[in-house]
Image (cartoon, helix red, strand yellow):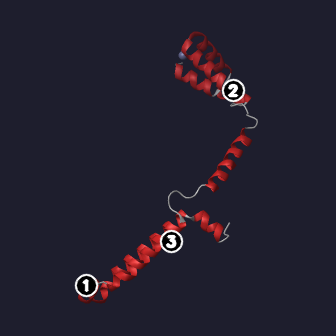
């Protein structure tokens, strides 16, 4: 019987009958490599039976207090770099630039040459710009906006 077969029986001793246990004992007595492996398996099984890793009293309270302290510290810091006033100013600039583009001289020439079908890409562009601005504004100020509109 080879070392691999012996080690399979060492890993699953409940499948071994009396004769197999005798073979295992004899092989482990003769084969130092398998005896070392079997000793490690026995130590690991013992550690798992006894509860490994050992319970750490107070670890849960320490982790939860650190998490709650981090949440409280997060409330005091402002969103990095962009205030709500800056976002409103950028929105006003975006709105003014989107509405004044229709009064430009080049726009009239292109619109007259292309006809009504020119309004489709213009509409897609304006809609995309407004949607992206709104998504970024709401995404970057989610906490402020939810507190302002009492959503949480
Ligand atoms: Zn062996």
Q: CA distance from mark 2 to mark 1?
A: 80 Å
Which of pointers 3 and 1 lies earlier in the amino acid sequence?
3
Q: Is residue 11 left or right of residue 115?
A: right
Q: Would you say the residues marked 3 and 2 are in contact, meaning their CB atoms lie under 8 Å apart?
A: no
- Residue 44 lies in what quarter of the image? top right
- Residue 5 lies in what quarter of the image? top right
Report x, y in % for residue 132: 45, 70
Q: State the quadrant of the C terminus.
A: bottom right
Q: Nearer the viewer, residue 33 or 113?
A: 113
Which of pointers 3 and 2 lies earlier in the amino acid sequence?
2
Q: CA distance from mark 3 to mark 2?
A: 61 Å
Q: Quadrant of ligand 1?
A: top right
Q: Which marked residue is nearer to the observer: mark 3 or mark 2?
A: 3
Disc number for residue 110: 1
Disc number for residue 88: 3
- Tell me the element at label 1: helix
Residue at image coords 70%, 25%: 46
- Tell me the element at label 3: helix
């Amino acid at each position: 019987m080879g070392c691999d077969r012996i080690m399979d029986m060492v890993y699953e001793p409940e499948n071994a009958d009396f004769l197999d246990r005798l073979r295992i004992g004899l092989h482990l007595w003769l084969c130092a490599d398998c005896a070392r492996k079997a000793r490690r398996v026995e130590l690991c099984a013992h550690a798992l039976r006894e509860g490994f890793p050992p319970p750490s009293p107070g670890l849960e309270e320490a982790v939860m207090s650190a998490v709650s302290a981090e949440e409280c510290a997060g409330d005091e810091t402002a969103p990095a770099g962009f205030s709500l006033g800056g976002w409103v100013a950028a929105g006003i600039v975006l709105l003014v630039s989107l509405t004044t583009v229709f009064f430009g001289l080049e726009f009239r020439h292109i619109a007259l040459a292309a006809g009504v079908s020119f309004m489709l890409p213009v509409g897609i562009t304006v809609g995309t710009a407004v949607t992206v601005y709104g998504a970024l504004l709401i995404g970057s100020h989610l906490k402020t906006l939810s507190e302002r509109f009492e959503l949480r």
